[in-house]
Amino acid sequence: MKKTLVLVAALMITGTMAYAASADKGKALFESPRFGGGTTGKSCNSCHAGGEGLGSDLFTRKQFTIMKMQKKTLAEVVNVCIENPLGGKAIDPNGQEMQDLMAYMKTLVTKPGKKKTPKKIEGC
Ligand code: HEC
């Protein structure tokens, strides 16, 4: 009985670990031109290195405008960027990769001195 409990607890801990967002994994995706099956040779980092072009209110905003389209969630914005500048395919908005990517982007936009309205960048 005790052994079973220990086993269940161990499984729960490893399960949680597998699903926790990883900023390190997100960084690797952000810098990979193959992210989302990208075909243009560009990565998110090509245009957004160090958080360039990303507003400090990215995670609290309720409405986004991207390529003149209105989007309600950041995941949709990310998928517009995967499909357009990266030439890839949209990823699962609730999947592990999206969560890892978000965790990394959070480290970029919460840096001290980051502005709400970023300097305009080109390309999307
Ligand atoms: C070729 C350059 C380029 C690449 C590559 C690119 N973006 Fe963008 N991104 C832009 C531009 C330009 C904008 C602003 C678009 C607009 O205002 O319509 C933008 C906007 C955004 C925004 C909204 C920022 C804000 O504060 O409103 C997010 C989030 C974003 N990009 C994430 C990504 C992610 C994630 C990737 C990789 C999958 C990526 N971008 C790849 C150029 C790029």
Image (cartoon, grey):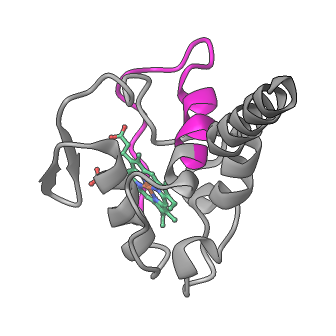
Dividing the picture into quadrants, the one containing residue 119 is top left
Residue 98, magenta (yes or no): no
Asked if 9 appears above or below 99 in the picture, the reply is: above
Indicate the quadrant containing the N terminus: top left, top right, bottom left or bottom right: top right
Residue at 40%, 51% in the rendered image: 94
Asked if 21 appears above or below 47 in the picture, the reply is: above
Residue at 23%, 60% in the rendered image: 67
Q: Is residue 71 left or right of residue 21?
A: left
Residue at 32%, 53% in the rendered image: 77
Q: Is residue 34 visible?
A: yes
Residue at 65%, 47% in the rendered image: 49
Whole-percent x, y for residue 111 in the image: 62, 19
Q: In which quadrant of this rendering is ligand 1 seen?
A: bottom left
Looking at the picture, tell me which residue is in the foreground, 102 or 20: 20
Whole-percent x, y for residue 23 in the image: 69, 39
Q: Main structural element of the magenta stretch: helix, strand or loop? A: loop
Labels in figure, total? 0
Dividing the picture into quadrants, the one containing residue 11 is top right
Looking at the picture, tell me which residue is in the foreground, 51 or 22: 22
Looking at the picture, tell me which residue is in the foreground, 2 or 30: 2
Q: Residue furthest top?
A: 112
Magenta stretch, residue numbers: 100-124
Indicate the quadrant containing the C terminus: top left, top right, bottom left or bottom right: bottom left
Dividing the picture into quadrants, the one containing residue 34 is bottom right
Residue 105, magenta (yes or no): yes
Q: Is residue 4 left or right of residue 113?
A: right
